[in-house]
Image (cartoon, rainbow, N blue to C red):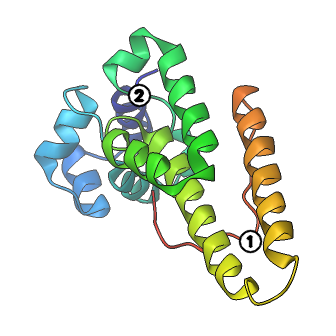
């Protein structure tokens, strides 16, 4: 089911009007109407606010809809996520994928923020460790293993986890 239809269905079950939901979610009424009609793909922040207003878990709404190209070719969406996780070995490609695709695919927004936060966290840990012999190699090996394990999890459709993550970017 598309995200807009899901939002409308839950809103009606909750006995809310579009105006009430828009006010509670702190979004424009016209924006909500466009989302429910499938005219726009909502940003992840907007989905979070709507989920809060409907008193439901965000995951109920996330991942329901990707961009039109991803809907027509589901492999593209998964391929993007795999490349996003793999590119976390180098900061720039992950950052570029996240910047250009996050507005069109909520999964890329979430995964990308997690990947970039992990990269920046590991960089913050790695820089001071340069003064200790052997520690940078251990941290680098740990980073590579975490990235590869999480990439495999994404390929298999399982949940991933980046330990030691400092939240800098949000989806």
> As drawn, is 43 to the left or to the right of 82?
left
**Image location of residue 166, percent across then percent down:** 62, 75
Residue found at the far left of this picture: 30
Residue 40 image point, x, y percent: 22, 32
> In this picture, is 26 found above or below 40?
below
Q: Relative to 69, is 89 above or below? A: below
What x and y, as percent, mark residue 134? 88, 76
- The residue at 54%/40% (across/down) is 84
State which quadrant residue 59 falls in. Answer: top right
Q: Which residue does the image show at 22% across and 43% down from the upper left?
A: 32
- Residue, disc 2: 66
User: Residue 150: image x %, image y %?
Assistant: 74, 44
Q: Quadrant of residue 41?
A: top left
Residue at the image point whose x is 71% and y is 38% from the top: 151
Q: Residues within 10 Å of mark 1 (few under 14, many from 20)?
A: few
Please name the residue that numbered disc 1 is placed on. Answer: 164
Name the residue nearer the viewer: 124 or 53.
124
As drawn, the label of residue 34 is none
Label whose residue precedes the other's in the sequence (2 or 1): 2
Between residues 141 and 20, which one lies in front from this camera angle? Answer: 141
Left/right of residue 40 with respect to residue 170 in the rendered view: left
Q: How many labels does the image show?
A: 2
Q: Which residue lies furthest to the top in this view?
A: 72
């Amino acid at each position: 089911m598309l995200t807009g239809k899901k939002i409308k269905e839950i809103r009606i079950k909750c006995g809310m009007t579009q105006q009430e939901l828009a006010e509670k979610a702190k979004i424009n009424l016209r924006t909500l109407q466009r989302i429910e009609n499938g005219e726009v793909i909502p940003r992840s922040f907007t989905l979070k606010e709507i989920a809060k207003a409907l008193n439901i878990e965000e995951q109920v709404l996330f991942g329901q809809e990707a961009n039109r190209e991803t809907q027509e070719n589901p492999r593209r969406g998964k391929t993007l996520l795999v490349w996003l996780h793999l590119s976390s070995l180098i900061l720039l490609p992950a950052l570029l994928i996240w910047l250009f695709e996050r507005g069109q695919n909520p999964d890329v927004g979430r995964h990308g923020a997690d990947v970039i936060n992990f990269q920046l966290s590991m960089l913050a840990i790695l820089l001071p460790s340069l003064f200790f012999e052997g520690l940078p190699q251990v941290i680098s090996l740990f980073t590579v293993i975490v990235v590869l394990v999480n990439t495999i999890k994404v390929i298999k459709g399982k949940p991933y986890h980046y330990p030691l993550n400092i939240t800098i970017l949000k989806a």
